[in-house]
């Protein structure tokens, strides 16, 4: 038993046979056909070269299945986690740069450590802090952000990312209106059509793989990618050499200022470590002021480089080709007698320095290009305390979101298969998948809804199918990467857009609203905040969680305190809710919730309110059926209520009190103050006895209460 808890995969082989292996082989192969193109697309969503998606699909599926509790959950790159990884790391490094790649791998390690720690400590319940309305609002917004982030690749345009996602989309729209590369758009749209049609014909057909295969073959034969490398002199545009020099100078300035800021940051860290007593605080303040000044200069330099980059990207040319020699003229400004190739060429400008002797001009569409052959080098990422603390906040959000997605999928499949799930074991599996994945150059991964559905649909019996999937990715990395060279980037964009359509769930907003209006409002607010602050996706999550916690605290502080009376079904129900007539002399009060420090005074307020509203009140009966817990503050407040009631000559009784509540009252001697005769096992017994006390032991005329609703509650 202990051995299977440490190594859950040992339980796979109970009753396992050749038929099961055959089914798992087919399921693993089917998932791999979906995973390989999807993982490459998601890697680019994470700001990484496409082949890092294959690295993320290499070890994680196998490790997660070996050490998780679900036998059908398919782990690997997923859209939301990829987007969050990119969004969280963009402030630290330029997307696609060696530093960014290193940060992505380290982030996967931190995510894995956090998930593994939660699983080992049996703290899987911490995921409950993310309520379903918050997750629904975030997921819908993330789906829109993910899909729209692919528009630039879909239309074949190039823009710099703005501080906010909606600003980036405005730039993409402006660039698309200025110039759309129609062959790129055709490839993207064709891929969407192929996937949609094949899915309708038969969902079992690997529509993603078919779309990728067809478009890659066409791309190869028509020469979709058409690049030329030329010196500046080949471009017949006045002062372009000066523009390129200015651009390179701005990039060098950003790098120089960034390095200077980093060096000062290290110096500040050293001084803070050495600081004792009064310490060198003045030096630290001076250095921090220098950092602020450098940050402002970097922002200015980035804005300048953005303007120059936009100018260079907006230039469009036509080419005169003579053998290997290219001469480029501004489009629509061709000298008389010059015959061009008819294509529109653009300068490829990224965030790095341009080589004036080897400028890259694009006369076609963007493709994946060369993918390194072979498996990634297995190395443990360098992780220090500073990097760990810097990445931990993001890692926590990614860990919880990724696990929520994974466990939701696993539960849905377990409901169909009858398999028993252990959320903490699943956390261990997901954590180890990210830890071992980072050793194999993977970025953060999670359970995938679409691929898990494919795995289940293919009839996967055990996690052997995920092991087969990993083996197929290994074969691809070793032997098949050249086949992906001509895969159009627009097709990968189409793959992502089609995948995230399933994340859009507008019914979730309606469902949350119908359940509780405040849940619906929180879901909508989370949705709009996530959209507004993208790419800073953590803002939407934090606002949603804060609102959920605020509502929870408010409801805990002001629980339902209902005054009960006779309902037509012969039971005691809320007078306010059912608009019932009550007794003039007896108030039956039900408190729904734990009686603790935050809401104890609220019970007192409500009882004072009932006393004010009922001048003829003689007795209060507290229905304690809804009280599951009571702390010292709650007990003390209850004692004060009892004392005030007795001082006013009014009776006080308790019914339906649970064992733990009675134990607290007994230990604090409040039970004796109330009197054992004033405790009743049921509401009916209490009402019957109190009615007798009120009428037989007081000067109230019994006939005055013959129409009292409570008399109908007592059997004659």
Image: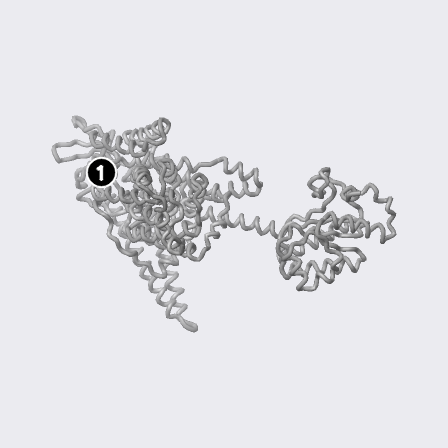
Can residue 521 be spotted in the picture?
yes
What's the residue at 74%, 47% (across, down)?
684
Q: Residue 428 appears at what percent x and percent y?
A: 39, 53
In this view, 190 is above or below 670: above
Can residue 89 be spotted in the picture?
no
Q: Quadrant of the C terminus?
A: top right
> Which quarter of the picture shows residue 259?
bottom left
- For disc 1, the neighbor class at 10 Å (few under 14, some 14 to 19, many from 20) is some
Q: Residue 553 appears at what percent x and percent y?
A: 58, 52
Which residue position is annotated with label 1?
485
Q: Quadrant of the N terminus?
A: bottom left
What colouring does the structure picture have?
one colour
Q: Residue 131 appears at what percent x and percent y?
A: 50, 46
In-front residue for pair 256/5: 5
Q: Secondary structure at mark 1?
A: loop
Seen in the image, is 451 located left or right of residue 531? Answer: left
Q: Residue 708 appears at what percent x and percent y?
A: 80, 43
What's the residue at 34%, 61% (across, down)?
384
Seen in the image, is 237 located left or right of residue 77? Answer: left
In-front residue for pair 397/185: 397
> Which quarter of the picture shows residue 231?
top left
């Amino acid at each position: 038993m202990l051995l299977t808890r440490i190594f859950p995969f040992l339980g796979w082989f109970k009753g396992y046979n050749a038929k099961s292996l055959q089914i798992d082989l087919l399921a693993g192969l089917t998932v791999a056909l979906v995973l390989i193109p999807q993982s490459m697309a998601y890697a680019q969503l994470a700001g990484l070269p496409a082949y890092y998606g294959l690295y993320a699909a290499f070890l994680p599926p196998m490790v997660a299945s070996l050490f998780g509790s679900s036998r059908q959950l398919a782990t690997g790159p997923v859209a939301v986690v990829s987007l969050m990884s990119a969004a969280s790391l963009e402030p630290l490094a330029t997307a696609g740069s060696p530093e960014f790649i290193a940060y992505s791998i380290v982030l996967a390690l931190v995510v894995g450590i956090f998930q593994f720690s939660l699983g080992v400590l049996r703290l899987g319940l911490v995921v409950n802090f993310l309520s379903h309305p918050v997750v629904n609002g975030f997921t819908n917004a993330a789906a829109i952000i993910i899909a729209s982030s692919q528009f630039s690749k879909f239309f074949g345009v190039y823009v710099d990312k703005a501080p906010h996602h909606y600003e980036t989309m405005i730039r993409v729209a402006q660039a698309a209106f200025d110039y759309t590369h129609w062959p790129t758009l055709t490839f993207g749209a064709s891929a969407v059509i192929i996937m949609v049609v094949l899915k309708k014909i038969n969902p079992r057909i690997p529509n993603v793989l078919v779309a990728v295969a067809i478009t890659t073959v066409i791309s190869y034969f028509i020469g979709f990618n058409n690049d030329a490398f030329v010196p500046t002199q080949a471009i017949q545009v006045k002062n372009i050499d000066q523009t390129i020099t200015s651009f390179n100078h701005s990039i060098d300035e950003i790098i120089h200022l960034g390095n200077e800021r980093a060096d000062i940051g290290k110096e500040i860290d050293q001084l803070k470590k050495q600081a004792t007593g009064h310490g060198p605080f003045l030096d630290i303040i001076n250095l921090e002021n220098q950092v602020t000044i450098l940050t402002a200069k970097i922002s200015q330099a980035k804005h300048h480089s953005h303007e120059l980059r936009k100018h260079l990207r907006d230039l469009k040319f036509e080419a005169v080709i003579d053998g290997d020699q290219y001469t480029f003229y501004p489009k629509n400004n061709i000298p008389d007698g010059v015959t061009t190739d008819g294509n529109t060429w653009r300068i490829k400008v990224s965030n790095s320095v341009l080589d004036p002797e080897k400028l890259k001009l694009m006369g076609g569409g963007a493709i994946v290009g060369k993918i390194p052959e072979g498996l990634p080098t297995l190395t443990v990422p360098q992780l220090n305390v500073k990097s760990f603390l810097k990445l931990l906040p993001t890692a926590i959000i990614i860990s919880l979101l990724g696990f929520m997605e994974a466990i939701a999928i696993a539960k849905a499949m377990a409901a169909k298969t009858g398999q028993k799930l252990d959320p903490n074991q699943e956390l261990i599996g997901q954590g180890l998948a990210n830890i071992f994945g980072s050793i194999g150059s993977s970025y953060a991964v999670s359970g995938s809804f679409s691929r898990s559905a494919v795995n289940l649909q293919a009839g996967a019996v055990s996690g052997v199918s995920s092991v087969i999937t990993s083996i197929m990715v290994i074969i691809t990395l070793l032997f098949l990467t050249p086949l992906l060279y001509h895969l159009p980037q627009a097709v990968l964009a189409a793959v992502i857009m089609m995948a995230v359509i399933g994340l859009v769930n507008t019914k979730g907003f309606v469902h949350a609203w119908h359940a509780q209006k405040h849940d619906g409002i929180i879901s909508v607010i989370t949705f709009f905040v996530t959209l507004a602050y993208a790419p800073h996706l953590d803002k939407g999550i934090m606002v949603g969680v804060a609102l959920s916690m605020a509502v929870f605290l408010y409801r805990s502080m002001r629980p339902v305190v209902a005054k009960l009376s006779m309902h037509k079904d012969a039971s005691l129900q809320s007078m306010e809710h059912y608009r019932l007539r009550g007794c003039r002399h007896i108030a039956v009060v039900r408190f729904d919730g734990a009686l603790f420090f935050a809401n104890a005074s609220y019970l007192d307020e409500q009882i004072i309110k009932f006393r004010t509203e009922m001048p003829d009140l003689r007795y209060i009966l507290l229905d304690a059926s809804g009280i599951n817990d009571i702390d010292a503050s709650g007990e003390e407040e209850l004692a004060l209520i009892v004392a005030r009631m007795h001082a006013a000559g009014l009776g006080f009784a308790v019914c339906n009190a649970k064992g733990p509540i009675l134990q607290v009252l007994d230990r604090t001697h409040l039970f004796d103050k109330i009197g054992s005769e004033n405790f009743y096992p049921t509401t009916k017994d209490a009402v019957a006895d109190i009615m007798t006390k009120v009428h037989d032991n007081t000067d109230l005329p019994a006939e005055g209460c013959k129409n009292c609703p409570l008399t109908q509650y007592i059997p004659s």
